[in-house]
């Protein structure tokens, strides 16, 4: 009995301390040769891995923006994009320089405080990060189940089963995390490529309808002016609803966390991974630019083309604004493919 308990303790101890031996290899003294970098993945492939977190918010972001800001949704989204490109992106490019081994911003903050203050501060931040992580997981899984349940071909069969579907999807997501980030990169590249391609089609078709139905722009600008009066009032309201829209910014932290998987230059070492840092900055910048373009375009077409009542609870665009446009303008087959892609990502 004692032997069994000792074996269990040893396995638990080995699991808890896994990786410490590798960490020790990087600090063998000033005269030790530099540790070579392990083989990684091209930065754009790792970007697709972070894109499963970042880009996937397109599935529900336009709908949330419409509910939070109404006709002001495109303006509020532009404010979000400005904060992203002028604030979050430069900060995380700096974080990539300071934590090239994936420690992230939390480890940087720990260095500024003494031992116990730093540890307690990090534990507090990790609590917030874990909460954000769980919210993102459940929100994404719930949105995926909405795309499944609200699909015109399945709504009669899956009606009132959204909770069960959400729990199943969360369990599947947990299985992916248990498998590991690195193993998921190949799948992520395919999912992100298909998903962004389908979104390009929806955006182009949506913009075409906005251009050919000129009255929708006039109706929007007239309603916006009547509701908010002037530009300063619009910007003020946009800043107030900003926290409700900043759902995808956790993707930057994910981008830094997966830095060890980014392939660097042949002469990179663990002590000086210049190539990895450079390519991670490319990853963060490219992801931010792609997402910014999609956010502005999707908020614009969904606000102008979808009736306001459809965004509300029970409406056909609630939680699936782009899917609504896909079904409306491109037919049931394309709309179903779009739903499947959104669920997968």
Image: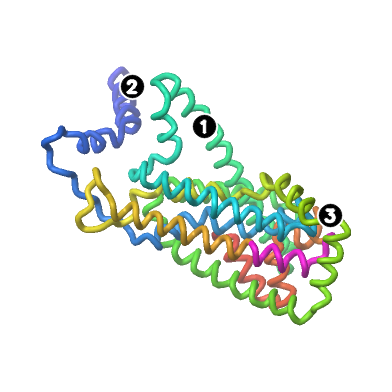
Q: Is residue 307 magenta?
A: yes
Direction from residue 144 to residue 191 in the image, left or right: left
Which residue is tagged 1? Answer: 125
Point out residue 78 in the picture as x, y percentages from the top left corner. 66, 58
The residue tagged with tag 1: helix, strand or loop? helix
Q: Nearer the viewer, mark 2 or mark 3?
A: 3
Measured in 3D between alpha carbons, the distance from the residue under mark 1 to the one under mark 3, in whole angstroms, is 37 Å
Find residue 181 and name its label: none
Out of 323 and 222, give the one closest to the viewer: 222
Vertical side of 109 occupied by 141: above or below: below
Q: Is residue 175 visible?
A: no
Task: State the residue at coordinates (80%, 78%).
Answer: 214
Which residue is tagged 2? Answer: 5
Find residue 228 and name its label: 3
The residue tagged with tag 2: helix, strand or loop? helix
Q: Is residue 199 magenta?
A: no
Out of 275 and 4, give the one closest to the viewer: 275
Q: Which residues are magenta?
A: 296-309
Mark 3: few/some/many CA within 10 Å (<14, 14-19, 20+):
some
Looking at the rendering, in which quadrant would you find the C terminus? Answer: bottom right
Q: Are marks 2 and 3 in contact (CB under 8 Å)?
A: no
Task: State the residue at coordinates (40%, 51%).
Answer: 181
Task: State the residue at coordinates (67%, 77%).
Answer: 205
Task: State the residue at coordinates (56%, 61%).
Answer: 291
Q: Earlier in the sequence, mark 1 or mark 3?
A: 1
Direction from residue 323 to residue 15 in the image, left or right: left
Residue most extreme to the left: 31
Out of 91 and 165, give the one closest to the viewer: 91
Vertical side of 12 occupied by 316: above or below: below
Q: Is residue 36 visible?
A: yes
Q: Earlier in the sequence, mark 2 or mark 1?
A: 2
Point out residue 232 in the picture as x, y percentages from the top left corner. 76, 52
């Amino acid at each position: 009995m004692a032997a069994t308990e000792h074996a269990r303790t040893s396995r638990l101890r080995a699991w808890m301390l896994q990786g410490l031996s590798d960490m020790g290899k990087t600090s063998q003294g000033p005269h030790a040769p530099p540790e070579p970098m392990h083989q990684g993945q091209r930065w754009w492939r790792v970007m697709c891995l972070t894109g499963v977190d970042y880009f996937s918010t397109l599935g529900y972001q336009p709908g949330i923006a419409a509910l939070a800001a109404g006709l002001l949704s495109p303006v509020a989204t532009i404010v979000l994009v400005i904060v992203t490109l002028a604030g979050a992106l430069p900060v995380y490019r700096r974080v990539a320089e300071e934590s090239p081994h994936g420690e992230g911003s939390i480890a940087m903050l720990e260095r500024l405080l003494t031992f116990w203050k730093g540890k307690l501060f990090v534990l507090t931040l990790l609590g917030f990060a874990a909460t954000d992580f769980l919210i993102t997981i459940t929100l994404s899984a719930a949105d995926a189940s909405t795309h499944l349940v609200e699909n015109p071909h399945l709504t009669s069969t899956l009606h009132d089963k959204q909770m069960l579907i959400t729990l199943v999807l969360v369990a599947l997501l947990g299985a992916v995390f248990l498998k590991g980030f690195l193993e998921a990169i190949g799948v992520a590249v395919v999912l992100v490529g298909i998903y962004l391609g389908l979104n390009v089609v929806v955006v182009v078709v949506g913009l075409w309808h906005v251009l050919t139905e000129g009255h929708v722009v006039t109706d929007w600008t007239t309603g916006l002016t009547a509701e908010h009066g002037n530009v300063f009032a619009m910007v003020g309201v946009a800043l107030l609803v900003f926290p409700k829209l900043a759902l995808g910014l956790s993707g930057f932290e994910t981008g830094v966390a997966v830095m060890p998987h980014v392939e660097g230059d042949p002469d990179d070492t663990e002590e000086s991974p210049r190539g990895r840092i450079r390519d991670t900055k490319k990853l963060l910048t490219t992801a931010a630019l792609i997402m910014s373009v999609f956010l502005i375009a999707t908020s614009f077409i969904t606000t102008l083309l979808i009736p306001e009542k459809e965004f509300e609870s029970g409406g056909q665009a609630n939680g699936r604004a782009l899917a609504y446009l896909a079904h409306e303008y491109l037919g049931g087959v394309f709309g179903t493919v779009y739903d499947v892609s959104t669920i997968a990502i």
